[in-house]
Image: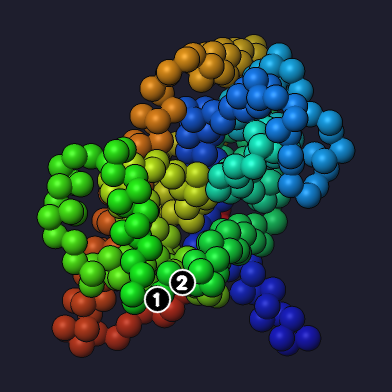
Amino acid sequence: MRLVAHFDEWVARAPVSHRDLSIGRIIYATIGLLTIWRADFAAALPAAAYRPPWGPFRLISGPPPAWAISLLTLALAGCLAFLLIGFFTRTASLATAALLVTLFGFGYSFYQIDHTIMLAVVPLVMAWSSWGSHFSIDSARSRDRPGQPWTPRVLALALGICYASAGWAKLRTGWLDPHIHTSLEYFLGRTPTTTDAIKAVMLAHPSPLFWEAVDVGTVVLELGVIVSVLWWPAFRILIACATVFHLGILLILSIHFFYNIPAYAMFVPWYTLWPLRYREWRLRPRAIVAVVAGAAIVAIVAWKVSSLPHAPVYETAGRLVIITAAAAGSAFLVSTFGSAASRLWRGRPRPRAGSRETLEASP
């Protein structure tokens, strides 16, 4: 029983409060509306090429028509807008996850599968959290539901599993072989899409030691995240390193992989860093209708913009998310290691490891 009590305490221990999760909800919804994932291309591909992986989509003979996928995308934009304002937050969270999985299922049934699953995992897990308890219409209507304290830990575990699956695949396929620099091979294969200045520097100084360090660092990072779930300070350091890693991939390989960054936002103490002065308000029915109508307009505009051919919003927003996250992650790393070095230099005792705060006790 004592072991169970310690486990329950460990699960409920979180580095964030209810307000932090609520701000994370707004960030997730904003990123989602700016980078709506579309599967329209699936309707234009031949049905003979429809080969979904094992799962429920094998029960479907082919992708739905374009208008059906477009309606699913519009519904996704609406759910993201509801998440933004915190209106029926739990229902909107579950609907967002279901719609994303559905669109992924149709889009990834033609052999190629991208690593976008965390976009759906975040609302699926956080639906049971308290991320609708502040800065939301639900809180203004006193309809916010109490959240479960285990959600940050479960989300961290899901993120660790995603990274571990990628790291294990690399470990099994020779990424740590000192005679094969896999990162260099990827770089050389994508040089047409790499910035000329970066390409020139990399090719002018093809250091084997550098590329081997990149290979090893990638595997260590991806396999280390799931281990760091046991201790919040280590987990935060690794996801901060991951933001810098995403920026390096963007600069070197021109791959704007931002799909995990909304998950990182759930582990940032936003309210501690930026304590907003506000008080909970109560909205009248007319005001609620106006806010919901405004959110619906935002959803329609985001859906329409995302459907424009050659629209630069998706890639531009993705790059901006990566750069902003890398800047925040770098600042956190400098602050963390700078404080540790200062304490070590002055001989001060190290603070207790890990936060003892639980979401149940958070304001």
Three-letter amino acid code at disc 2?
Gly
The answer to whether residue 312 is above or below residue 84 is above
Q: Is residue 11 visible?
A: yes
> Which residue is nearer to you in this view: 186 or 355?
186
- Count of number-bearing discs: 2
Mark 1: which secondary structure?
Answer: loop
Q: Does residue 1 sit above or below 70 in this rendering?
A: below
- Horizontal and vertical percent position of residue 281: 56, 30
Q: Disc 2 on helix, strand or loop? A: loop
**Which residue lies at the image location 46% right of the left edge and 72% below the top edge?**
174
User: Does 280 sit left or right of 324 as displayed?
Assistant: right
- Horizontal relation, residue 53 to residue 226: left or right: right
What number is the disc on residue 174?
Answer: 2
Question: What residue is pinned by disc 1?
Answer: 177
Q: Are marks 2 and 1 in contact (CB under 8 Å)?
A: yes
Residue 82 in the image: x percent, y percent?
63, 27
Distance in Å between CA atoms under marks 2 and 1? 5 Å
Left or right side of 356 for 323: left
Picture coordinates of residue 159 (x, y %)? 56, 59
Residue occupying the point 38% across, 63% down: 182
| Crowd rating for badge 2 (residues with CA inside 10 Å; few <14, some 14–19, many 20+) | some
